Amino acid sequence: MRVIAGKCRSLPLKTIPGSNTRPTTDRIKETLFNILQPNLPDCRFLDLFAGSGAIGIEALSRGASFCCFVEQNKAAVSCIRDNLKFTRLENQAVLLPMEVHAALSKLRGEEPFDCIFMDPPYRKNLEKEVLIEFTDASFIGENTLIVVEASLDTDFSWAEQAGYLILREKKYKTNVHVFLKRNTDS
């Protein structure tokens, strides 16, 4: 795995051995960031369920000014630290080595993120739990773009009722990226 574009282009990134995480493939990451690119310059980025940190590091490499990484797995936390140090991006990052709900509680009162990416474990309904927790969060602004990576069979029919607009879905062979914003008209 590597950084695809930007100031850290082609730098290799460490990954976590084993099957506890699913690193986003370079091809899917490239497609995702081609979609996100207009939102990245000087943005505040939040990478939830960060794994190796590859998504947040790609955002920083492509122009994000800041990224907060949230990951509870100790091996993954170590991997993120190593990857940030290797890419020399640690001064633009904060790593919260804790469970996502605890991190979201810690982030209360923070200024809004411009873009939030989350890649929770599949088929555990965590994306719904987190999006519902976002409802009153100070760090979600009216223009915050939220991207959820999920399995193809994940149901998002509840999203509108929970106060979100689905802006776009990008399907791949085994997963999907769902792009959402808070519905400020409701």
Image (cartoon, grey):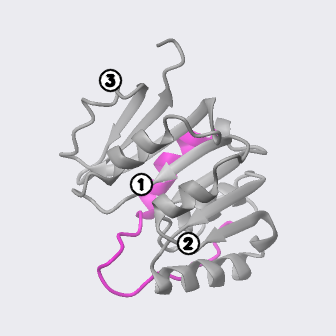
Q: Amino acid at mark 1?
A: Ile
3 and 2 marks in contact (CB < 8 Å)? no
Q: Is residue 69 above or below residue 160?
A: below
Q: Amino acid at mark 3?
A: Gln
| Whole-number angstrom distance, CA of label 1 to CA of label 3 | 29 Å
- Disc 3, SS: loop
The x, y position of residue 118, in whole percent, is: 46, 53
Q: Position of residue 31 (x, y in %)?
A: 47, 47
Identify which residue is drawn at 29% across, 48% down: 172
Between 167 and 143, the one lying in front of the other is 143
Q: Earlier in the sequence, mark 1 or mark 2?
A: 2
Residue 181 image position (x, y, % from top left): 50, 29
Residue 86 on image: x %, y %: 71, 82
Query: Is 26 inside the magenta-drawn segment?
Result: yes
Give the residue drawn at x 70%, y 53%.
62
Residue on which the image places disc 2: 2
Q: Which of the labelled discs sits on residue 161, or is there none?
A: 3
Chain part drawn in magenta: 9-37
Residue 16 relative to residue 84: left or right: left
Single out the mark in the foreground, 3 or 2: 3
Residue 14 part of the magenta-drawn span: yes
The answer to whether residue 68 of the structure is visible from this angle is: yes
Mark 1 = which residue?
28
